[in-house]
Amino acid sequence: MRKRSRPNVIVMYADDLGLGDVGLYGGSACRIPTPHLDRLGAGGRVFHQGYATAATCTPSRLSLLTGRYPWRFERSGILAGDEALVIPPGVHTLPGLLREAGYATGIVGKWHLGLGRGDLDWNRPIAGGPLDVGFDEAFVLAATNDRVPCVYLDDDRVANLDPADPIEVSYDPDRPLTQRPIGRDAPESLSMPFSHGHDMTVVNGISRIGTMSGGESALWDDATMSDIFLERALGFIESHADRPFFLYQAFHQPHVPRVPNPRFIGATDLGPRGDVIVELDWCVGQVVAKLEALGLAENTLLIFSSDNGPVLNDGYADGAVERCGTHRPAGPLRGGKYSLYDGGTHVPFIANWPGVIEPGESDAVICQVDLFASLARLVGRPVPDGQAGDSRDLLDVVLGESEAGRDELVTEGFDGKTALRSGPWVYIPPHPGPARDENTGIELGNADQPQLYHLGEDVGQARDRAADKPEVLRRLELRWREQTGPAQRNTRHPTAASPPTHRVPGRRPRRLPPQPEASRGAT
């Protein structure tokens, strides 16, 4: 089919959405209706071997935007809500590359890559955020919807902030801010109980990670968050309909706390988690409808994926575990969010471009880190020297013109622990820590001995082949060491034994060197 030059590009990025949470992947076991995602897949390319680089949010997002594995960066763990920008000066980004190609660039939704340079002041314009790494426009959550401050950032300022009511934020347990109720001390103030962590400042009846004071006029409403983000996304599309644009639409769903708009309460029998996935699906449909109404659909490449695999109990007692029933959020995969097993990083991955991508399915291995190099070729820009070194040009795979996907991929579980996929084989090195996290109930993949699985014969990773395939084990161990090199560490935080309970130990963000003003927005 004829390729159109300089198409619009939209990357839709769900948060904690599993393979089995989407109808076209989950089949009859999926108890969540996702008609808009199913339609998107039916009209495009459905990848059955699509991956995030990591089983947690910040690292995956870092890879998506930089074309590098997350463990190559000094700070790429799950960030608190007040940490400095994790993308260092001089690192080129996907939005920066597309802006150099003449694209209008925007982000709407979840950011969670840090803000500021170690001297964050929520009451002033923030230098060190989306506008500094290639985005022209930004309307975002600073971190996640379960962390303070519970406010939106409009470009580089807190939206609707009253200067007479300044915001202060603390992630220091020795310096909590107590202007608002603290969840663990005032359970009567909660409309949604916490199960582990998430027990600090209460906003909208929900206790969060960290404490905050001030900013009353700027607080978000959890129930209208999807509508607010959708309105901004549709507005960005409409305002840039006359020129190429790149929109990174980073959904906050189905991340905790799960608070559907009243219109979607009861949309499933799975409780809030199922309902917010229906809401997410509806938002996808609204974006597609806007593209069609503006006559832009046939010149827009739309990619949908998720930052990591699913989790049911991630800190709130919202009935997700009790009401899951026969629904399988990770589909046939083992593990989920935080896990080294395939359920941690093997996620939905759909590419849709009417008239260009023929409908079909693919078993090619493709990763979100590959979007940098692939989109660079699409828009006719070279990958800058020394940049995006882990990204592979798989544009022909995205467009359905090739099945030659990745041969190897390094994936990351929690706390910087990595595994290697090579062909159909997965090698998981020995890693310290518990085999299962007691809070989430998810198998983490930690073990004293190396593990080896053949995904072609055993997609659920039920049979460890390390003992009967010693030659494969040795080969993959060597490749893992060659791939990860000295940058690889068994843990980023040696004292951590399992996924965080979301109480951040007392510390302040490391102060970063100031960037020269000329570099602002240049990456």
Image (spheres, rainbow, N blue to C red):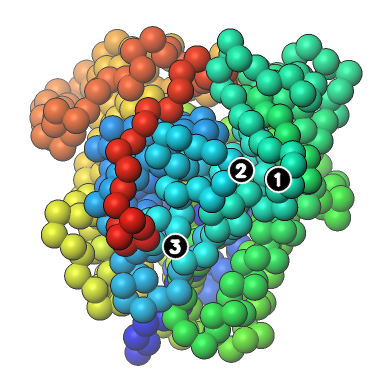
Report whether 151 appears left or right of 118. Answer: right
- Between 1 and 304, the one lying in front of the other is 304
| Residue found 35% across the figure and 70% down from its top | 98
- Classify 10 Å Cα crowding around label 2: few (below 14), some (14-19), many (20 and above): some
| Residue found 86% across the figure and 55% down from its top | 263
Report whether 405 appears left or right of 441. Answer: left
Q: Secondary structure at mark 3?
A: loop
Observer able to see residue 322: no
Residue 146, horizontal then vertical, whole percent: 65, 34
- Between 414 and 226, the one lying in front of the other is 226
Q: Type of residue at label 2? A: Asn
Residue 82, horizontal then vertical, whole percent: 52, 33
Residue 364, horizontal then vertical, whole percent: 32, 58
Q: Secondary structure at mark 1?
A: loop
Residue 444, compared with residue 69, is above or below; it is above
Q: Rounded to the nearest whole Å, what is the CA distance between mark 2 and mark 3?
A: 21 Å
Q: Are marks 3 and 1 in contact (CB under 8 Å)?
A: no
Name the residue that disc number 1 marks. Answer: 163
Residue 388, horizontal then vertical, whole percent: 23, 54
* Sequence-wise first label, 3 or 1: 3
Q: Are marks 2 and 3 in contact (CB under 8 Å)?
A: no
- Classify 10 Å Cα crowding around label 1: few (below 14), some (14-19), many (20 and above): few
- Between 110 and 192, the one lying in front of the other is 110
Residue 103, compared with residue 418, is above or below; it is below
Q: Type of residue at label 1? A: Pro
| Residue found 69% across the figure and 70% down from its top | 286
Name the residue that disc number 3 marks. Answer: 135
Name the residue that disc number 2 marks. Answer: 123
Observer able to see residue 482: yes
